[in-house]
Amino acid sequence: MTAQQAIAPPCAPPGSPGSPHDVTPTSGVIHVNSRHTSGFTVIGNHLAQHGDLSLLAIGLAVHIQSLPEGAKIGVKVLAARFPESEMRIAAALRELEAAGYLRRIRVRLRDGRVRTRTESHNRPYATPPAPREPYAAPRATTPPPAAPPPPPRQQHPRPTPPANALHRTAALLLADLRRHAPVLTLSEADVAALTPGVAAWLERDAHPDAIRRALTTDLPAPLTHPARLLRHRITALLPPPLPAPSAPPAVIPLQNCDDCNRAFRAPEPGQCRDCRRP
């Protein structure tokens, strides 16, 4: 028979309560993590702890990055999924686009139609990707299509002399657009930025009803950037100034001939043409 061996009791694992390696904080958050094996999305701390994005924008970015390819992420689709309003969701999408986590590219189809493709970036596209590890196997990748060059920015129209009355009327017209098209609900900053352009229309004797029809007719659906669409229409559809009224033609008065008393037209009294002949 072999002699029995004494087995020492197992030592406490590092970090367990009462051990010298106990690093459990006394306050704040304590992470209790479980390893994911399926159905998870990797999110970088540059997004989760972003210092400039709102909490709604960060949560919306996490939701979009967890969706499968081809999923719809329009404002109306997201508003039907979450309790936030379309206005707040549209503002959060603009935050993500400005921070580089969303990118909208206009693509022309073979039949000539133009569609907007939305790209979700797990790392801001303005930041170059991290270099590959030396031992990583090279993978054949297809470079993404180059984005079309941005068109030249049109100068926003402004009235010749800044008139307070025109600006007040233009601001009221812009704020009232949501009564006719709810998707054109503008913020105070958007109204202030677009007011000079509408004031230029009013200066050119455009009727407010005509301006309203030009800004609210044939709106695209879904409309993600109402202020950007209105800026384009205000600039591109600006009517030309009315021509100055022409002066009426001068009327030559009637005169009576001094010799034959015939009526003839002349600027001053005198003889008619027949009496002036030798």
Image (cartoon, grey):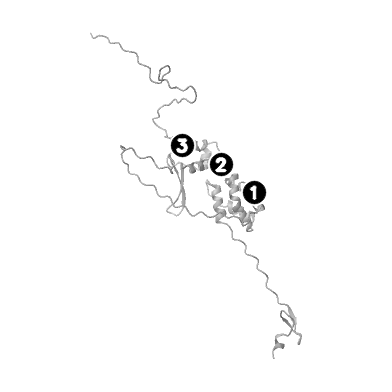
Q: Which residue is mark 2?
A: 87
Q: Does residue 186 appear in the picture of this structure?
A: no
Sequence-earlier tag: 3 or 1:
3
Q: Position of residue 110 (x, y in %)?
A: 42, 53
Q: Are marks 1 and 2 in contact (CB under 8 Å)?
A: no
Horizontal relation, residue 122 to residue 76: left or right:
left
What is the quadrant of the C terminus in the image? bottom right
Answer above or below: position of 269 versus 157: below
Check the picture and name the quadrant holding the N terminus. top left
Which is more N-terminal, label 2 or label 1?
2
For numbered disc 2, what is the local secondary structure?
helix
**Residue pointed to by mark 3:** 47
Horizontal side of 32 relative to 212 (left or right) equals: left
Give the amino acid at mark 2. Answer: Met
Q: How many marks?
A: 3
Residue that mark 1 sits on: 172
Binning the other alpha carbons within 10 Å of mark 3 as few (below 14), some (14 to 19) or many (20 upward) gives: many
> Which image quarter: residue 71?
top left
175 above or below 9? below
Residue type beneath disc 1: Leu
Find the distance from the CA under tag 3 to the CA under tag 1.
Answer: 39 Å
Q: Front-most of 8 and 35?
A: 8
